[in-house]
Amino acid sequence: MTDFTYPEPKLFIGGVWLEAGSRDTIPVLDPATGAPIARLPVATQADLDAALDAANRSFPAWRAMSAIDRAAILHRAGMLLRERARYIGHVSTSEQGKVLAESSAEAAASADIFDWFAEEARRAYGRIVPSKFPSVRQNVLKEPVGPVAAFTPWNFPTTIPARKLGAALAAGCTVIIKPAEETPGSCLELARALDDAGLPKGVLNVVFGVPAQISEYLIASPVIKKISFTGSTMVGKHLSRLAADGMKKSTMELGGHAPVLVFEDADIDKAAAMMARSKYRNAGQICIAPTRFYLHDSIHDRFVEAFGRIAGGLVIGNGLDPASTMGPLANGRRLEAMGVLIEDAVGKGASLRTGGARMGNAGNFWQPTILTDVPNSAAVMNTEPFGPVAVTQRFTDMDAVIAEANRLPYGLSAYAFTADGARANALADRIEAGMIGINFSVLTGPETPFGGIKESGHGSEGGIEGLDGFLITKYVAQA
Ligand code: NAD
């Protein structure tokens, strides 16, 4: 796409696209160069009030529209996302950094998400419960919860908003979404597709600004009935407290620190290839990225070598360059965090097998990194690295390694590799995580539940559970 220019970011309120005008603005930076590519308008309090009013006023008609008609709009928007996937890919790569193939695939995956929820909306069944009273009907009804406030991060700037919007809109909810200020364009493209597909005005509103101020304001509003957040555990706890003040429903998709257990009987080359691809996709900025590698002592070195070959073969560069297989980190904070975590681990006795340093001095490029024999005292064994860093430890005993895997307060994803079926079942039962890949790495799909336990959050996105998060249950006994 030679004639690509990054689109001017706007606010989308009440079905109207609003330019910066006299509003404050925030620069949007290209993580591959550090250069500003646009200025993002910051919503004023009047803008937030207008968004609340729009979400509130449009709710009765949107919930009353048949699920089949809502589905038709979502399907049309999905079709537009597929047609525009390459363009949206350019938008995402320019603001987020990931390679174009990943960005374009993300736009297409968002279309699949819209399609899934469009169909699920038609199956938001209630039920009739047999009654002990003669001629009494006991009906269980499912209804949309009401206007939703959604907050999404910068690592998957298209699919994370798509999951929230697809499910909420399909359920009959209206939405105010605040995507990450660093990556506004991708979510705005979702809004544009929905607008072009005929979404009624006011059903979706997109705002930007100072995250803490916007979330506090929206969550406190009596209009908002549900909060959906993806981001760090620390912010998730804060928003949960705000939601509790109004006894509002919430879904929290928070941080992870995925353990990977590789047993001596596993197909080591296959496991290493699968896990290396997962580790370095999106430069490791994925909440379900494999991170803590617990490798059976007898295969530790063989696994690290196979994994390291793949890490060493990655082509690090601007995501818009088709030759690149890994782009820059999305922002300077991640770059700084990598340096601190790696220096700390090496200082505490870890071996740096590969990588470990920034690349060049423009853009946020960091080498794919492997640290071996990392002690639990190192911060990286406890803090989500959210970058291209894999850490290993050796094990010999299954009970001990399961205890290690479950040691952290996180419980998002986990992976295990073994040829022993009974052991695989035991691992599935005993590992504390919302999602587990056994001899497999892909855990995200529109039709499967996605979510964590423990301090990784609560609620699921995706699957039938994803729709349910935006529905309330009402019981009606009718004589
Ligand atoms: P952060 O915790 O400040 O921000 C994460 C996201 O939450 C951003 O999109 C931000 O805009 C938003 N946010 C922050 N404070 C908010 C508030 N008070 N109200 C509403 N939204 C708010 O940190 P960060 O530097 O962007 O990322 C740091 C860490 O966050 C990462 O290391 C990772 O652990 C976690 N993270 C997780 C995910 C995920 O997919 N679960 C995504 C991005 C970041």
Image (cartoon, helix red, strand yellow):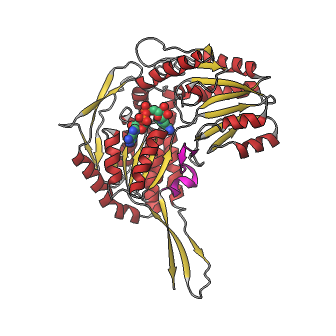
State the residue at coordinates (36%, 26%): 4
State the residue at coordinates (31%, 42%): 213
State the residue at coordinates (72%, 46%): 429
Query: Magenta stretch: residue 455 in it?
Result: yes
Q: Quadrant of the N terminus?
A: top left
Instruction: Specify whether 10 is left or right of 117.
Output: left
Furthest toward the bottom, the residue is: 134
| Quadrant observed for ligand 1 in the rendered image | top left
Task: Please tell me which residue lies in front, 14 or 470.
Answer: 470
Instruction: Specify whether 178 is left or right of 81.
Output: left
Task: Give coordinates of residue 345: x percent, y percent.
Answer: 58, 20
Q: In which quarter of the image is residue 146?
A: bottom left
Task: Please tell me which residue lies in front, 279 or 192.
Answer: 279
Range of residues picked out in magenta: 452-469
Q: In which quarter of the image is residue 154?
A: top left
Observer able to see residue 84: no
